[in-house]
Image (tube, rainbow, N blue to C red):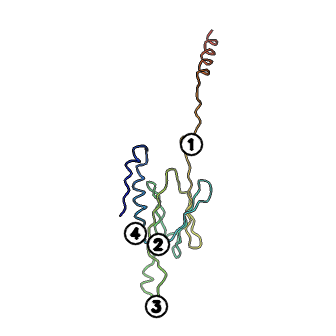
Amino acid sequence: MTTIDLTPLYRSTIGFDRMASLLDSALRGDQSSGGYPPYNIEVTGENQYGITLAVAGFEEAELDIQVENGTLSVRGKKAGSQDNDQRRFLHQGIAYRSFERKFNLADHVEVRGAELRNGLLTISLVKEVPEAMKPKSIAINTGANTLEHKKDEKSKAA
């Protein structure tokens, strides 16, 4: 297994503590679900994203979507497996197996909603940066501005 030493990066950055664990999990891959169900991640607009999972055969009540600590989890558990136990198949190519898919979300990314249509589960996400985090201009005071400001204060005081 490949490991990456991010110690030099930590010398010049602040607040990227989660990066090592994210890289480690990305290098390991999602071995638990074996690539099921297939999914797409797309950019749908400025600061808007969508995740589409192919969940054919699952109903809305059999799917669970949760967000916790910056991780989006999508779980599917097929109800009514007793019905399949009573049936005799010559060939069973449609898998109704349970699954769990996890996606790491960046800071300020929020889930806006989910929709199940034609066997595709689409999750809408939006990145909303708070006003305090947006760039702002800082005025630079020069020596001339400071002197003029002090003269104005003295003339007002007199």
Reading the chain from its start, which is encountered first: label 1 or label 2? 2
Task: Indicate which label's residue lies in the foreground, 3 or 2.
Answer: 2
Residue at x-position 62% and y-position 54%: 46
Q: CA distance from mark 1 to mark 2?
A: 38 Å
Residue 31: percent from left, percent from top = 40, 69
User: Which numbered dot is residue 90?
Assistant: 3
Reading the chain from its start, which is encountered first: label 3 or label 4? 4
User: Which numbered dot is residue 36?
Assistant: 2
Examine the rendered structure and indicate whether residue 67 appears above or below residue 94: above
Indicate the secondary structure of the residue bearing disc 2: loop
Give the amino acid at mark 4.
Ser
For disc 1, the marked residue is 134
Give the amino acid at mark 1.
Lys
In the displayed structure image, the side of residue 128 where residue 30 appears, left or right: left
Residue 141: percent from left, percent from top = 58, 26
Indicate the secondary structure of the residue bearing disc 4: loop
Q: CA distance from mark 3 to mark 2?
A: 23 Å
Give the amino acid at mark 2.
Tyr
